[in-house]
Image: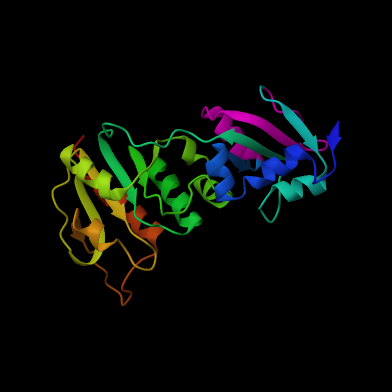
Amino acid sequence: MIITSRSNERVKAARALQDAKARRETGLHLIEGDKLVRDAFASGARITTVFAREGAAAFDGVETVFVSESVMDALSTAKTPQDLCAVAETPDVRCPAAYPEGLVIVLDRLQDPGNLGTIVRTADALGAAGVLISPDSADPFSPKALRAGMGSTYHLPIYIGSLRDELPRLREQGFVCICGHLKGSETLPAIGRRTALVVGNEGQGVSDETAAQCVPYRMPMRGRAESLNAAVFAALMMQTIGNRMPE
């Protein structure tokens, strides 16, 4: 059987997951694209349903629902939809009692899902221990953030929690919290095995409340630009901190 109507109940339920409210209410999210669906499945994501374009091969191990090209176009937010979309259970994003040792990336009110996904991908590539995201940031399980993450969203722990509560807990657990700040020192503090890098909002940077919990750092710049794109700053800082972390 091939679903050809966009009004089909299963299609409507899946399409609703393009909206953050529906994702929160159902505990589900939508994965778009062949590679991302397969990477998520291989990484242990709990996929409930795969929607496959008519003529594509069935997806092994999960119920596959075949749909027409117009339905796949409706399911996908991408400009060029691929052959697969999937509905998956959103992982547990509650903050842990004890944070893992290593570099924890903290995102303070980051608004661009593309930036957020890119930072998650970079954190994965550079061996970060996890990513803590403030609740007023972009949703890491939105379609755009997942595409930018390129599967890394399922490779390392993602936590969502109030920075007012979590930054003091990180400090209590021995983490040195460093934030990018235009008024910060151009000298990094000593880097140990427990370091948190805080990346702020694209336009406003970190909040004053967040900055008060951190060592403010201003990255030296030789040109005339005052600041960097949040994802670029995060990548450069992750590399710098990672190179200084003890083995």
Query: Farthest residue toward the top?
Result: 61
Q: Is residue 35 magenta?
A: yes
Residue 217, position in %: x, y? Answer: 21, 60
76 or 135: nearer the eye?
Answer: 135
Which residues make up the magenta segment?
Answer: 34-60
Residue at image x 66%, y 52%?
77
Residue 160 visible, this angle: yes
153 relative to 187 in the view: left or right: right
Query: Farthest residue toward the front?
Result: 25
135 relative to 214 in the view: left or right: right
**Colour mode?**
rainbow
Residue at image x 69%, y 33%?
50
Residue 15, position in %: x, y? Answer: 68, 46
Residue at image x 66%, y 53%?
78
Above/below status of 63 relative to 187: above
Q: Quadrant of the C terminus?
A: top left
Q: Quadrant of the N terminus?
A: top right
Residue at image x 22%, y 44%?
195
Above/below status of 236 relative to 226: above
